[in-house]
Image (spheres, grey):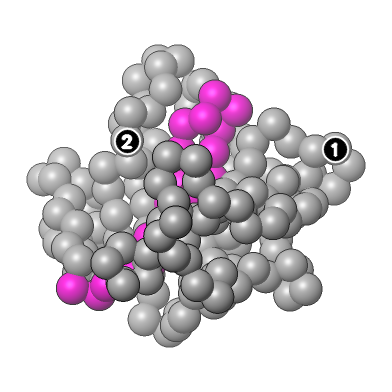
Amino acid sequence: MNLAEVDAFIALAKQVATVGPWRADRTDHQRMTKVLTLSDGIVILPQHAEISALADLGERKAKAQVFWQDGTVIARLEMGNPATQHTNSRSRPRDVPAIVRAPHVHLWSDNRRLLRGNRALSRLEFARPVPGEVSGWKEALIWFLNSCNIELRPDQSPGLPERVTLL
């Protein structure tokens, strides 16, 4: 994993080739996941996106992530309780607020400087709020994927599972 490769991937126009079914996570039966296979319009790419929905004591949370070939998360959208707080460090980009109290996104453009050499990124440190004009899961998901240059057709837009329950 190196900076130039990830930058080129983010810049590449991509589309969702397939949307997998919701599946229960083996390690946490409260979590459901759905994989989005990506294509450049010609071939299936080794990178992929994943959506997960989590029921946490009755609170619904959802997240979407874009993964590099080695499984490293390079971008993430987190939806859930607006009271949840994310604190960015002092070394954050100038236009990133110190504290984010709303649904938020960890963009590659904000976190790319954390990549050192060819080592995998250990975590996405910097987050910014989802724009105020974006409301709801489907709108936020489309906005997030577009920010990663990934097209999701309207007929592919996955809603959240009806109910995520403890097994």
Compared with residue 52, is residue 73 higher up or lower down, i.e. above or below?
above
Residue in the foreground of this view, choosing between 17 and 55: 55
Whether 149 is among the magenta residues is: no
Q: Which mark is residue 27?
A: none
| Label 1 packing within 10 angstroms: few (<14), some (14-19), many (20+) | few
In this picture, which residue range is highlighted in magenta? 62-83
Whether 68 is among the magenta residues is: yes
**What type is the residue that disc 1 sits on?**
Val
Q: Which mark is residue 43?
A: 1
| Label 2 packing within 10 angstroms: few (<14), some (14-19), many (20+) | some
Residue receiving disc 2: 123
Label 1: element kind:
loop
Residue 37 point in image, percent of width and height: 72, 46
Residue at 78%, 45% (x, y): give it: 39
Residue in the foreground of this view, choosing between 32 and 139: 32
Q: Quadrant of the C terminus?
A: bottom left
Residue at 37%, 71% (x, y): give it: 60
Compared with residue 62, is residue 107 higher up or lower down, i.e. above or below?
above
Residue at 33%, 41% (x, y): give it: 124
Residue in the foreground of this view, choosing between 65 and 62: 62
The answer to whether one can see residue 161 in this image is yes
Occupied quadrant, residue 15: bottom right
**What type is the residue that disc 2 sits on?**
Arg
Label 2: element kind:
loop
Compared with residue 55, is residue 15 higher up or lower down, i.e. above or below?
above
Mark 2–mark 1 distance (CA, rounded to whole Å)? 29 Å
Total marks shown come to 2
Occupied quadrant, residue 134: bottom left
Q: Residue furthest right?
A: 42
Residue 133 point in image, percent of width and height: 43, 84
